[in-house]
């Protein structure tokens, strides 16, 4: 499925990632994280999390296994961001595991477009809410999620090894009927 949207005369598309998109997803993650996360988490934690979460084998397993759906956003055929969705029928929710956009493009409504696509897919699966985790210091993301109708539903501190923790808010958006 290609989701197109004309944005300032540019063609914005979102497509479901396949195995061959894995190196691209890793490259995007590395580029975006290294710009966005300094000041939120330290450089050592950035590199540790990138090496774990974006190992090529792990991404391939997630895509092959079908539990996680990766979507890549392109503008004029250049990849600028991605998100990862995980369906959770037991809790009647769709989990937004990852949403990253090139920081140069923040503030143009593209993140909102990605969230709208996430919501569309949640409704398609008849899920009644979207759940995500966001770092408590990530002010820009917190503002964007609040604008999109998410609210803080809890906190979670997760030990991820090597002395690092993920200090997150859990946010939810109810989708109603």
Image (spheres, helix red, strand yellow):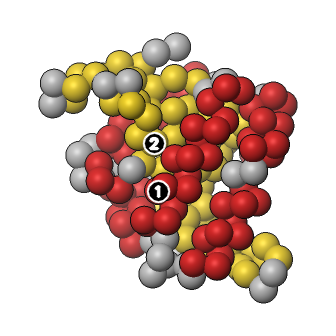
* Contact (Cβ within 8 Å) of mark 2 with mark 1: yes
Percent across and percent down for residue 167 are 63, 77
Of the pair 61 and 155, the residue shown nearer to us = 61
At 36% from the left and 66% from the top, the residue drawn is: 140
Is residue 55 positioned above or below 137 on the image? above
**Mark 1 residue element:** helix
Label 1 sits on residue: 32
Of the pair 175 and 121, the residue shown nearer to us = 121
**Mark 2 residue element:** strand
Is residue 7 positioned above or below 57 on the image? above
Of the pair 14 and 135, the residue shown nearer to us = 14
At 46% from the left and 15% from the top, the residue drawn is: 2
Question: Can the viewer see residue 126?
Answer: no
Task: Tell me the tag on residue 81.
Answer: 2
Percent across and percent down for residue 40 are 49, 78
Asked whether, in this view, residue 28 is left or right of residue 21, the answer is left
Q: Give the distance between the C-alpha atoms of the residues marked 2 and 1, in whole angstroms.
A: 8 Å
Neighbour class for label 2 at 10 Å: few (<14), some, many (≥20)?
Answer: many
Percent across and percent down for residue 158 are 75, 74
Asked whether, in this view, residue 37 is left or right of residue 22, the answer is left
Question: Can the viewer see residue 51?
Answer: yes
Is residue 89 positioned above or below 153 on the image? above
Neighbour class for label 1 at 10 Å: few (<14), some, many (≥20)?
Answer: some
How many numbered circles are shown? Answer: 2
């Amino acid at each position: 499925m290609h989701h197109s949207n004309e944005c300032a005369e540019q063609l914005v598309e979102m497509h479901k990632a396949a195995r061959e998109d894995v190196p691209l997803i890793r490259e995007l993650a590395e580029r975006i994280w290294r710009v966005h996360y300094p000041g939120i988490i330290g450089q050592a934690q950035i590199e540790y999390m990138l090496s774990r979460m974006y190992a090529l084998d792990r991404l391939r397993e997630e895509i092959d296994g079908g539990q996680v759906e990766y979507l890549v956003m392109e503008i004029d055929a250049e990849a600028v961001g991605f998100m990862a969705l995980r369906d959770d029928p037991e809790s009647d929710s769709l989990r937004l595991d990852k949403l990253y956009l090139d920081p140069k493009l923040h503030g143009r409504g593209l993140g909102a477009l990605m969230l709208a696509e996430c919501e569309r897919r949640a409704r398609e699966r008849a899920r009644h809410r979207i759940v995500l985790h966001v770092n408590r210091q990530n002010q820009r993301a917190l503002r964007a999620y609040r604008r999109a109708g998410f609210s803080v539903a809890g906190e979670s501190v997760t030990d991820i090894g090597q002395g690092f923790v993920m200090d997150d808010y859990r946010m939810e958006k109810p989708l109603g009927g």
